[in-house]
Image: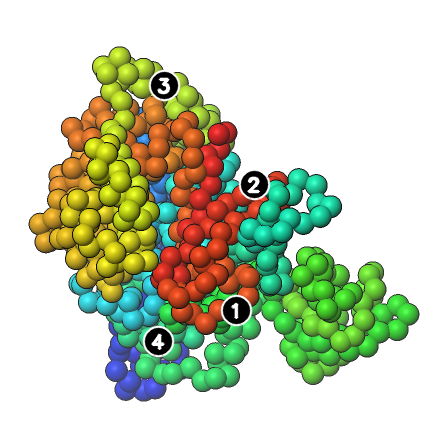
Amino acid sequence: MSCKRSIGAESLGAVPGAEKRAVPELLAPAGGPEALLAAVAAGADAVYLGLKAFSARVSALNFSLDELSCAARVAHAHGVRVYVALNIHVADGELAGAVNQARAAHAAGADAFIVADLGLADVLRRELPEAELHLSTQANVQSAAGVALARELGFARVTTSRELSLGQIRSLCGTGVEIEAFCHGAICVCYAGCCELAALTQGRSANRGACTQPCRFAYALVREGSPSVGEPGERAGLVEVGAVEGDRLLCPRDNCLIDHVAELAEAGVASLKIEGRMKNPDYVYNVTRCYRRAIDAAGEGRALSDAERAELRFALGRSFNRGFTAAYACGEAGAGALAGADFMSYERSINQGVPVGRLVARDRRDVEIELAHGVKPGDVLEVHFYPDPAAKVSGPKRWPMIEVTEHVPAGGRLRAYVKRKVDPPCDVYLVRSAGVLAETEAALVPLRSELAAATSERAGRDCPRSLPGQSALCPDVPEDPREARAREEVYLRDALAARAGAASECGWSPAASPRRARTPGEAEGVLSSGSGRVCVYQHDLAEDPAAWDGVLPQLTVVLDEVMCDDDARSAAVLMMCAGGTVCRNLGQVALAREIGAAFEVAAPVAVRNARAAAVLKRLGARAIWLAPEVGAGEAACIAAGVDVPVGWLEGAPGEPGEREAMVCAHCLLQAAGPCDGRCAACARRREAHWLRGRDGALLRIEVDARGRSRLYAQPYGA
């Protein structure tokens, strides 16, 4: 288990005699060997990485087991721990391969494993008991009850949801379980582990590592109204109502908590995590060294000055970013106009860089830029010029670029040629920093030598040779992401089809799910007809709780996908008053057990294999309702391995009807204009709204009384 690092008077810049303070571990991403070296060079305490299979970032370079062994040797020589992410949801036929890979990775130097799948964790706990397990953010834990359950299941650390505020994180740190919190990097607009958007719309599962990032695509916000004229393919009766500059309506800015490091340290966070296994080594080096500086200051008990904070924010902006936000940590992302303006990157989903000056003049050929920050040869600047400032929404998404060829200090003026016509005044951004690239390269040189020496030493050993595409340490695990995807496709098509056929011959069919009622009157009608069980979703009930009082004891309540500590009381009341409960969060499972309530379990509590189903049954689950992306063949395998009902709440695969694609803390209707934050009374959310993609496909939006948004989609191929 990791130890929080202590920084004292011996640290550079510390006050002599200053008291040592415990500070969080700095955990950096390593998408490949070069990124790992960059993290080590920049002062990371630990790195996290993926192998060629069972990682939620299959498109990253990732590591072979031989590469892991050599890289871990270098990392350990510098006191840096190595965590291996086995954080996808694992199908039944893959469990043995995943365990073999973990065993080989542990032998190669892995210090801990980041796991999301409860079935895989259960097997590892028994077959590799010496391995340290960290619960992935994909497990969607936001409450002290969920953290306590994670400890019971064998996890030494829990990675929290990005959506939590500083106060909520502080509360989780009081549980005695190590808490890992994201401090920097990309944000998924959906709660981690709850996103089915890519799976439903493109057949690519984010929970299996194959996300296509549809949240970065262009959308229009539409609602019912008079139809537009002259727009081919336009669905009659829908009009666009977006009122923001841009069409990336699901794209948040990047998380940046550089100003809150001291607060996170004081709260007791064990590890501060930088997102970015898809990022380049220069990104890893630059971001890691910035947070190293902030953490060291916190350890010295020294508050960063305003000038130091500004310097660090600018330094972070020199690496890839979509603009920065701290809205979640500050508790502002759920409601209010500020969240829409300061949380979302509506204009673009690509690098936005950092402002360095203003274009102030131009002649027939050149422009003149007044610089607030110095530039150097090799820097690339971007000129944010709108031909028509009154029509910024339709402005260019890629602006003219300038490659700098000379040193110009802050306060100076740069003359440069621009191919496209631009007029002053307009802002100029740095989007590529030659300085960061050069500094990263210089820092990597000695570590490359160390890695080369470790590799040579390993090559000189009498190691078993591996077959093409396989690892000598783990021959059952493919080392190429393309092979991993091919393996998954073959497994789903052939093995599961065979097992499903066998299960079908044995008479298995999905359990009948309760029928959903959206109003008390609808519930009473179904009950009086004797058509079976009826359920109400918690966010539907919350619209008018008192109206459901008379019928609630006869209903099954399907709890929300999210449960923070301040949601626990309302969840407990529903568990005690309703006729049955479906938990959709591990915290709710823990709460139901605590109060003795009977419960079933549904996605996004993930069940992709019979072992995970058995874990939940052991905890008390009386039925298991699967995610929409779980196919019939997989479901048959799961059902064959556990003696509780198994099915789907929202309909079996192939059945018509929309499915829930994601749930977000952010209100997506803020794209229609500012709001006052009074979500329960909001008239806008009572109107029907959709997101329309460029292909014309519609995603229906629901916003509940708390301002959380849900997107619904028709299944892929339906």
| Residue 314 drawn above or below residue 436 | below
Mark with earlier residue (1, 4): 4
Q: Position of residue 229 (x, y in %)?
A: 71, 48
Q: Secondary structure at mark 1?
A: loop
Q: Earlier in the sequence, mark 1 or mark 3?
A: 3
- In 3D space, how far apart are the residues under numbered discs 1 and 4 (Cα atoms)? 32 Å
Residue assigned mark 2: 697
- Residue underneath mark 4: 262
Choose mark 4 or mark 2, whichever is in front.
Answer: 2
The structure residue drawn at horizontal position 34% and vertical position 68%, both measured from the top left corner, is 165
Q: Secondary structure at mark 4?
A: helix
Viewed as shown, does residue 406 lie left or right of 148? right
**Do the numbered discs 3 and 4 sit on residues whose CB atoms are within 8 Å?**
no
Expressed as whole percent of the image width and height from the top left, the position of residue 372 reads 66, 79
Q: Amino acid at mark 2?
A: Ala
- In three-dimensional space, the C-alpha distance between marks 1 and 2, rounded to whole angstroms, equals 26 Å
Front of the two marks 1 and 4? 1
Residue type at the position of mark 3 = Ala
Rendered position, 387 above or below 232:
below
Q: Amino acid at mark 1?
A: Pro
Reading the chain from its start, which is encountered first: label 3 or label 2?
Answer: 3
Amino acid at circle 4: Ala
The earlier-in-sequence mark between 1 and 2 is: 1
Q: CA distance from mark 4 to mark 2?
A: 45 Å
Residue 130 in the image: state x and y as whole percent. Answer: 19, 45
For residue 497, the mark is: 3
The one of 686 and 197 positioned closer to us in this rendering: 686
